[in-house]
Amino acid sequence: MNNRLNKIIKDSFNEFDDWIEILNNERESIFSKEEISAEDGVKRTHETSGVLAKISDLAIKFGGFKDNFDTSKMYLNLYGPCLIIKSEKTNQTLYLATDLKGIYLETSFIHGENLKNMDDSFWSELLELKKFKGFEYEENSYFSIETQRKYPELFHTYKSTMFLINRKFFISHAENDSDIDLGIFKVQWKPEGDFSNMIEEICLAFKSMYKLNYKLWKISDLRKKKSSC
C-alpha cells in the first residue's frame, strides 16, 4: 500500500467499526420486512450518506487534487443513498453509493470528443482502473439499428472495454454525431470484503477516474483559453 494512503487509512481506522455498522444497517433494511417510521428512515439515510461523504473525503485527500469538490448533495436510489461528488474545476461528477451488491463508485467520462488527443498514459491509467476486481463498464447510449447494419463486423458481442470505447468514438465521428457518450465506468465492492482494503481501493479508483476525466477535460480547457487570447 502507498505509504501516504496507509497513513490516511490509519488516521480514520478507529471510525471504521461505526461506519461498518451504519452501512450494514442500511443493507439489512433492504431485505427487512419490518416497517420502519419515516423518522427512522430519514435518520438512517442521513447516517449512511454521512459515511459515504467521509469515505469520499479520504479519497479526495489521497488524490491531492488542485480542485475543490462539492459533496453536499445526494439522492435516493432504489437501494439506498447515492452521494454526488462534483468537481469545481472540471465539472465532472462521481457517485459513491450503496446498492444490493454493496458499495460502488462510478462516473461517466466527459469531453469524449477529445479521445483522439489522448496519449498512451490515458490508456495506461484506464488499464489500472480495469485491474480492480469489481470493475464494470456499461455503454450509456447505443447506435441505431441502421447504423449497426452499416458496420456489422463491429457489432458482434465484444467485451473489450477499450474496443467498445473506441468503437463509440470512431463510429460517432463517421456518422457526424457530435454527442460522444463514452459510457459509465464503475467499480463495485461486496460487503463481505475487508473494509480497510475497500477504502484503499475506493481511494485508488477515485484517483484514476478523476485523472482520466481530467485528461479529457484539459484539452477542451486549453482550446478555450487559446480562443480567448
Image (tube, helix red, strand yellow):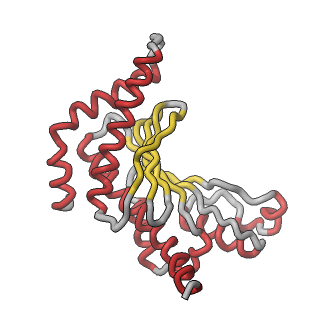
Residue 200 x, y percent position in the rendering: 27, 51
Residue 177 x, y percent position in the rendering: 74, 69
The residue nearer to you, when weighing 12 against 202, is 12
Q: Quadrant of the N terminus?
A: bottom left
Above or below, comparing residue 13 to residue 109 in the picture: above
Question: Which residue is found at the position 43% from the left and 37% from the top?
Answer: 98
Q: Quadrant of the C terminus?
A: bottom right
The answer to whether residue 192 is left or right of residue 110 is left
Residue 101 x, y percent position in the rendering: 44, 36
Above or below, comparing residue 178 to residue 184 in the picture: below
Question: Which residue is found at the position 30% from the left and 39% from the top?
Answer: 193
The residue nearer to you, when weighing 84 against 5, is 84
Residue 18 x, y percent position in the rendering: 23, 31
The residue nearer to you, when weighing 225 against 180, is 225
Question: Which residue is found at the position 38% from the left and 64% from the top?
Answer: 128
Q: Quadrant of residue 2?
A: bottom left
Question: Which residue is found at the position 50% from the left and 31% from the top?
Answer: 79
**Most extreme residue toward the front, as rendered?**
229
**Most extreme residue toward the bottom, as rendered?**
229
Above or below, comparing residue 97 to residue 39 in the picture: below
